[in-house]
Image (cartoon, rainbow, N blue to C red):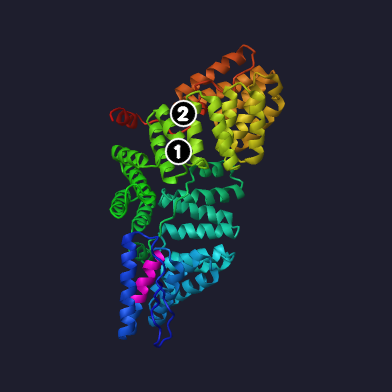
Amino acid sequence: MMIAIACDRSPELRPVPLPDVSRSDQSVQVQLRELHAAAVKKQESGAPDAELGAAYGQLAMVLHAAEYFDAAEPAYLNAQALMPDDPRWPYHLGHLFRRTGDTARSIASFTRALELRPSDVPALIWLSRTLTDAGRPAEAEPLLARAHQAAPREVAVLAARGQAALARGEHAQAAALLEEALTMNPGTVSLHAPLAAAHRALGNIEKADGHLKRWRNTQVPIADPLSDELAVSLRSAISFELRGVRAFDAGRFADAAELYRQGLTLTRPETPVGRSLRHKLGLALYFGGDPRGALQQLTEAAMLAPSGGHDEPASRAHYSIGIIMASGGRDQEAIEHLSKAVSYDAASLQARMALADPLRRQQRFAESLAHYAEAVRIDPQAADARFGHALALVRLRRYMEARAWLEDAVRAHPDRLDITNALARILATAPDQRARDGQRAYTLGNDLLKASKRTEVGETIAMALAELGEYNRAAAIQRGVIKAAQQAGLGAEAARMTINLRLYEDSQPCRRPWQDDDPVHRPGPPVSSQLATLISSR
């Protein structure tokens, strides 16, 4: 039954029905019914405006946090009508309308919040973001200038200014602001994507490529007391999970772990929310320096999973265990867990890639091909999957197919220098004569040299020259890259390069794009000896 609060007073108030809350945790159902009953009682008793407004506002916040948006809206509007000088209610309405896609009302609400509190940095940032998203970046810049004046060292302000500059096409300013934000907080890895876009527009292709490799989908933390108040208003497992995610993204791993533990007390461990909380607890422990405790939580989350079928929490738990096993040098166990991750979520790009890499490391090249190919099907822009697929074909000595895959990858990702370099090496060195084209390899190598002076590019040019019969020039370039490697303290790399130097000195071409022990054949996370010891002692 839906019960609405009466509205027979001035100012004119909207009905606030209590929605069907049966889908929520029991603790949330109790909380919402109590808050609704309290607002009804104050309405009927003729409580003062401020007192009734606070009751409406508290009810609205919990409805909002529980994602009952339709019911939260009239409660917020009533709180705003009764307490017109309180900036909380228009601020929360701004977020509510932003969440429901009502951009015009979101802008109006954030604007009202700023009228009441002109220097409120979170409101300035969120209004600027909403305007930028609405295609009005020019209106966002004055707001961000005000935010910068109020909080010149706030990473979120620098990030917002950088992204607004990028939207306006001011790429140099965007790059400078985003670089400054990353310098202040290297953990804001989501900024690598807009920074890569800025550098690409400026022609800094190698920088753009480096930033893209470091991108992760995280939130830029904002010191936002009102949003924090909203997050803590709800007594539910999900609310503790959301608060834990905020703490985790801000690098406060101990706080995140404690919030996840509190969430676990409010839900059954075998539920999707319970297993998700345990998985996140494991990650917080891992990044907080407790890998043993992390494995314990992740393993329990995996054991609580259903026996089969699609289940994202189970997939994520097995994925995380698989990555830890791979980082500990336990490829076989990594493959077992990552295979389970794929079985629970066949569309997971990260699980497909993470499984293909240890299969390739274990020389199970044919098996890796299927997972790389599926990763490309899931996301045609998955450059690493295209690259890994081509390298697996190389190890299977299927050079014509490898060349075709790399040519497609170069067309799809012209900024990825490692992919272009790999194609040049196949063209210069493939044992299958049909796949070779020394002149094209040399042209590609010289084009690469304009963007990167790395030793592997020099090696590729030497390979191409040897294929063209210019052995003296090839040997001279190879000696140069060997010297550079030695000066950099890369003894193992220099020794590997010497193998090709001997070929050129004997007037022979190279017929191996990479030596078998080249790092290019060891994809995936680096192995930690400390983690390997810990896993072995379990």
Whole-percent x, y for residue 112 in the image: 46, 76
Q: Is residue 57 magenta?
A: yes
Q: Please report contact status of discs 2 and 1: CB closer than 8 Å, yes or no.
A: no
The answer for how far apart the CA atoms under marks 2 and 1 are is 40 Å
Task: Give residue 303's quadrant in the image.
Answer: top left
In the rendered image, the quadrant that contains the N terminus is bottom left
**Disc 2 secondary structure class:** loop
Question: Closest to the observer: 473 or 303?
Answer: 303
Secondary structure predominantly adopted by residues drawn in magenta: helix
Task: Give residue 50's quadrant in the image.
Answer: bottom left
Q: Amino acid type of disc 1? A: Ala
What span is in magenta?
Answer: 55-65
Q: Is residue 293 magenta?
A: no
With 264 as the anchor, is 126 left or right in this view? right
Task: Give residue 115's quadrant in the image.
Answer: bottom left
With 29 as the anchor, is 493 left or right in this view? right
Q: Which mark is residue 440?
A: none
Residue ID at (41%, 77%): 116
**Disc 1 secondary structure class:** helix
Q: Which mark is residue 341?
A: 1
Residue ID at (67%, 30%): 404
Q: Note whether 214 is above or below 465 in the view shown.
A: below
First reached walking from the N terminus: tag 2 or tag 1: 1
Question: Closest to the observer: 342 or 4?
Answer: 4
Give the residue pinned by disc 2.
488
Question: Closest to the observer: 49 or 122?
Answer: 49
Whole-percent x, y for residue 103 in the image: 54, 68
